[in-house]
Structures are given as C-alpha cells and as structure tokens.
Image: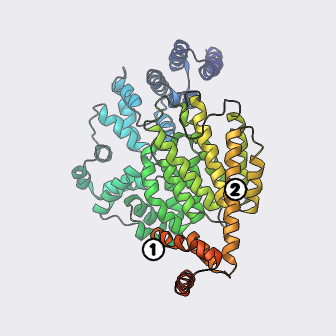
Amino acid sequence: MALFKGIKRWTDAYRQKRLIKTLTETNAYGKRIEVLEELGRIGSARAFGAIIDFAKRAERTLRNTAARSLIAIAERANAYGLLFSQLRDSSLASDADIIGCFEQHENKKAALPKLAALLQSKHEARFEVAHILVKSGWTPTEPIEKIWFAIASRDRREIAKYRALAIEPLESILLDDNREIVMKCWVAEELEQLGWKPINQNQLATCLLSRGKWDDLLQMGIVASGPLSKAMRRELTHLHGLEWVFNALPTLVQLDTMQAIDILRNIIGYKKYIEPSGRVERAVELLGAIVNPSNTTSSTISVIANALLGTVDEGKDEGWGGTTFPYFSEVRDACTKALINIGGQETITKVTEIIFKLGNQIGRFNEPFLDERNADTPNTIIGHQRVANSAIHILEEIGSKEAIGALNQALSVKSRTLSEKAHAALQRLNQRAERRELSEQPPETDHQVLLRLLNDDAVSPLTKVGLRSYELDAQQGTLDERDRRYLWALYDRLQRSSRT
C-alpha cells in the first residue's frame, strides 16, 4: 500500500511538471483550460507559483479557471496559508475573480472555516482573507475575526469598539511594505484616532508619508528618505499610485536627490506608463529640472533619450490627431528640453545616434516634408520625422564645439531633408557666433553702434523702426551731432543695464 502511494505521488509530480510546462508553452485556449483543470485535480502546493504567474497575465475566463484550480489544490493540500501568501505577493489576493471563486466554491462551507483560522494567526494576508470572508457571507464569532471584518469593511464604529485590540491588526497593515498607500492612509488615520504613537523613526516616517505630511517628513531629515523612497517604489507598480508618487517627489528631491532621480528614471523607462496620461511628460520635466552635470549619469541620459525615441510611435495610431498626438508632442518637447538642459558629450552622442538611426529610415521613403501630413507619407514615418527634427534642435541649442561636429556628421545622413535641417542649424550657429564676436568688440563707428542696437533684443521694435531711418547716414558718416549723441547715449544706457 505504501509502495502504491509512493508510485502515485511520483507519477502525479511528473504529470504536474509536464502540465506546467505545457501551460507556459501553449497558446491554445482549450488546451490551457484543460491543463488548469487537470492541475486542480492532481496538483500540489508546488504548482501555486506557476498557476499564479499564468493568472497574472491571463484573460478573465482563464484567470477564473486558474483561481478554481488554486482553491482546489489548497483545499486538498490544506495549504490556504501558503496560497494566500503567494497571492498577496503577486497582488492577486484582492482580485475579483479570486474572490468570486470563493463565493461560488462548491465546498465553501468546509473551506471558509479554514480561512477564518488564518485570522487567528499572524499571517501577512489576513486583510485579504477577511475581505473574502466578508464577501462570502461568513459570520465572525471571535473578537479578532470581528476586528478584521471591521477593517476589511472599513467600519470605523466597529473598530472603535475594540480600541486596544484593533491596534495590532491596523499596525501590521501600516508597517507592511507591500501595502498600497491608499490603504495605509486610511489605517494611519484610524490608528491616530485610537491614540497609537510610533515608537521609532521608521514608524513615524511611515505614518507621515501615508498621511502626505511632507513638511513633517522634511523636518525628520535624511532618516525619512529610506522609508519614503521604498514606499514610492512600491507605488510605481500601480498606476493609481503614481499620483501620490508625484506628490511625494518634491520632498524626496530635498531629502535625497539621487533617489528621486532614480525613481523618475524608472517612471520614464517603464513601458507600462507610455500612454496618453501625462505621466512620462511630468517625469521628464521634473527630471530635467533637477539634473545637473554633478548628478547626471549616462543611465539618466539614456532613459530620457529612449523616451524621446519612443515617441516615434506617434503615427502608428489610427487616431492620429486625437488624444495621442498631443501626448506624444508633450513628451517629445519635455525630453528635448531636458536633454538641452543636461548637455554634455554623452547627450550629444545619444542624440547623434537617434539622428542617424531615424534619418537612414526616413531616407528609404520619398523624402516626405517634415512636420507636415503628406498623402505620400506612410503613417509610421510621421513620428520618425518629428523626433529627428527634435534631435537636430537639441544639438543646435547645445551649440558646443562637439555639438557642431555632430551636426557636420549629420550632413551625411541618408535623408536629404534631415541633411538640409542640419545644414540650416549650422548656418544659424555660425550667425550667432558672428554676432557674439561682434558684440564682444567695442564699437568704433556710428554704424557699428546702430547695428548693435538693431540686433539687441532689449531694444523695442518701435524704437528699432526709428533707428532704421539713421542707417544710411550712419553708414556714410553723415549723422548730425544731435542724432549721433542720441545713438551713443542709448547704447551706453543699454550696456549699463545689461551689466546690472
């Protein structure tokens, strides 16, 4: 008999291994359903991880089947504690399909008492368990069960009845690094009502950041940066938590600038956030505002350059011209400003790579007009054109010797239009250099003074109109003494104001 059981265990373990391999490799819907049901019949607790990983990315009907398999295995192996630990770590413990399967579980009467027993322990998923018990119609009997039911239902009056007994469950949620900030905020308020006081700096920081008390966090100093950055990284995995992250960023910038830069890099580089929401644009703008040569790394430049390059997808959306176009435009502009602000050789190198990559792709088509929608222009090339244009603008605005060298290289790009853009940028840079050289030399003649005034942005357009009437006489040296004194006095006044 023992031999027979041993052979069966070995056979089931081998079948389970094969089923898990099939589940991860097959794309056939019917086959996946069949595999999940079979795992529910013969699987052990070791299958939890593979089924949960599958459920996280599966469509709803498949996720429902996966949930039933998980419950069947947990029931047979008496492993509800292990199941909920793994569900909680994967953020599936509060999933509607998981809860729904417990509500409809054929052996619910036998399963729910086992779940209720977890509330008596220190299990980390007690909140999720209580939530499922509430939804499944379980009636709590023990005080600790009633407390967890009140917490899961957010029943403030019921929590207040138990006061001291409710502090430990609430504290376990507040100090749990894996809890979402929305829940922590509510829990921190409840603990404050019950008279709870933090006993160390970490608990104090956690309480303050949950309540959004940024000024108090700043008063704590650098010791608050660790709990704050950890909580922010946790919230990055939830789209609804990003707003809190943005609210917290100014505080982290003051506490630990490098941590703030790293979090912003994560937001920009995480493809999940590339959507018409403004998140990437806001992150790039913030990053561009706080970086400087002393705190900028190649990875920071790379992530902004990649975000800029990511806007080439603009023309692929059939809804071009709708909500997608403003979004891509805003992200592109934010990336452009940030890279100009950072400057340096690393930025120039990244931007030059973008110009050649996109320019050579554009060159394969019939030279569409940049920044215009052309009937002969494929949708997929619209974004390429605008990003390449932005890259040339970045080099022009940096304007260093290295940037000019990169623009000279861009003259050889396969796209004729982009080559012309690079040439025009070089001409503008040459003109600026000539004006700068001219402005650095003191004027010697009336005509030189007049040219300085006409090229000075501080002189109003209306004044320039009047000054142009002096141009011929100034050039010939025939200005009368009164007009000459006026020109030189105006020039001296502008020089003095620019120095102050």
Q: Say above or below: 264 vs 213.
A: above
Q: Where is residue 149 in the image (x, y as percent from the top left)?
A: 30, 43
Residue hosting label 2: 427
Q: Nearer the viewer, residue 40 or 109?
A: 40
Q: Where is residue 418 in the image (x, y as percent from the top left)?
A: 68, 43
Quarter holding the C terminus is bottom right
Q: Say above or below: 98 vs 90.
A: above
Question: Is residue 260 visible in the rendered structure shown here?
Answer: no
The kind of residue on which mark 2 rests is: Gln
Q: What element carries label 1?
A: helix
Q: Is mark 2 on a helix, strand or loop?
A: helix
Q: Nearer the viewer, residue 181 or 488?
A: 488
In this figure, what is the number of numbered marks?
2
Tell me whether the residue at label 1 lies in contact with that at label 2, contact meaning CB atoms closer than 8 angstroms: no
The kind of residue on which mark 1 rests is: Gln
| Displayed quadrant of residue 452 | bottom right
Q: Distance between the residues labelled 1 and 2?
A: 53 Å
User: How was the colour assigned to the protein in this rendering?
Assistant: rainbow
Quarter holding the N terminus is top right
Q: Which residue is drawn at 58% across and 69% down?
A: 455
Q: Say above or below: 287 vs 140.
A: below
Q: Which is more foreground, mark 1 or mark 2?
A: 2
Residue hosting label 1: 219
Q: First in sequence: mark 1 or mark 2?
A: 1
Question: Is disc 1 surrounded by few (<14), some (14 to 19) or many (20+) residues within 10 Å?
Answer: few
Q: Position of residue 92 (x, y in %)?
A: 46, 35
Q: Residue at x 51, y 38 (%)?
A: 90
